[in-house]
Image (cartoon, helix red, strand yellow):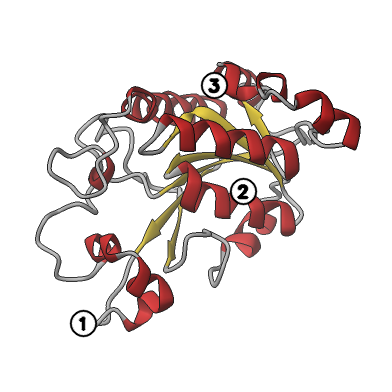
Amino acid sequence: MATLSLDSHPRHAAYRDAGFGQRLGWGRRPALLLIDVCAAYWKPGSPLDLSHNPEGRASVDAMARLVTAARTAGIPVVWAQVRYNHPTLVDGAVQAKKTKTIQAWQDGDTRGLDAPPLQHTDILTPAMGDTVVLKRNPSAFFGTTLATELHLLGVDTVVVCGVSTSGCVRATALDAACSGFRPMVVGEACGDRSPLIQQQNLFDMDASFADVVSEAEAVGEMSRGCQP
């Protein structure tokens, strides 16, 4: 994918010359982090459905392959999921005023949009021994125990995938870097509603605070398992 390289941008040389886009590289102990993987993003009629975008539609398949690879290698699998329980969405804070679509994760919503996706349900569901973090903000780190739990697992590298690229994936990758982890964002395993938004956000993350990597690279690195 051209989106995985700074070289795809018309001003890539200027970015490189300024010092952007240095590689963080992989650490010794990765974990796979899946963000908001649920039916809302691939269910026809959902206000969050992104399957009209071919890359967004295919991202759920890539996520399933990453989970399989992580489980095979014994890599920790971590799920970040949204949950609101206040009847007027006070716990959604400012975002509840800005983005009405978050009602999909409010207790009592009957549409079933917070259920596992229909695609690969058997794989894209937390299993015994996985870590599950409930969040109320775009970032899986903000206001949660995620950083502490990753530290207790000995993790130094977070393999990030999920939805949406411009929102929760981006916010989580930024906070991963701010928390001292190496964020590896798997481009094919992140989805958004627009190819342009997808490409621009992958480019900017790769330039500034994360390594955007291919699915093949992520699978290969995870296959090494956690190193001592």
Q: How many marks?
A: 3
Instruction: Check disc 2: other Cα within 10 Å, few if <14, some if 14-19, many if 20+.
Output: many
Mark 1 = which residue?
87
Q: Earlier in the sequence, mark 1 or mark 3?
A: 1
Q: What residue sits 33% from the left and 64% below the top?
A: 99
Is the Cβ of the residue at disc 2 closer than 8 Å to that at disc 1? no
Q: What residue sits 32% from the left and 33% below the top?
A: 123
Query: As displayed, is residue 126 above or below residue 80?
Result: above
- 40 left or right, relative to 133: left
Query: As displayed, is residue 206 above or below residue 45?
Result: above
Instruction: Check disc 3: other Cα within 10 Å, few if <14, some if 14-19, many if 20+.
Output: some
Query: As displayed, is residue 118 above or below residue 129?
Result: above
- 17 left or right, relative to 38: right
Q: Position of residue 193 (x, y in %)?
A: 35, 38
Q: Secondary structure at mark 3?
A: helix
Name which residue type carries label 1. Pro
Name which residue type carries label 2. Ala
Is the Cβ of the residue at disc 2 closer than 8 Å to that at disc 3? no
Q: What residue sits 39% from the left and 28% below the top?
A: 59
Q: Position of residue 202 (x, y in %)?
A: 58, 35
Mark 3 = which residue?
215
Q: Earlier in the sequence, mark 2 or mark 1?
A: 1
Residue 75 in sight from this viewpoint: no
Name which residue type carries label 3. Glu
Q: What residue sits 24% from the left and 66% below the top?
A: 103
Mark 2 = which residue?
173
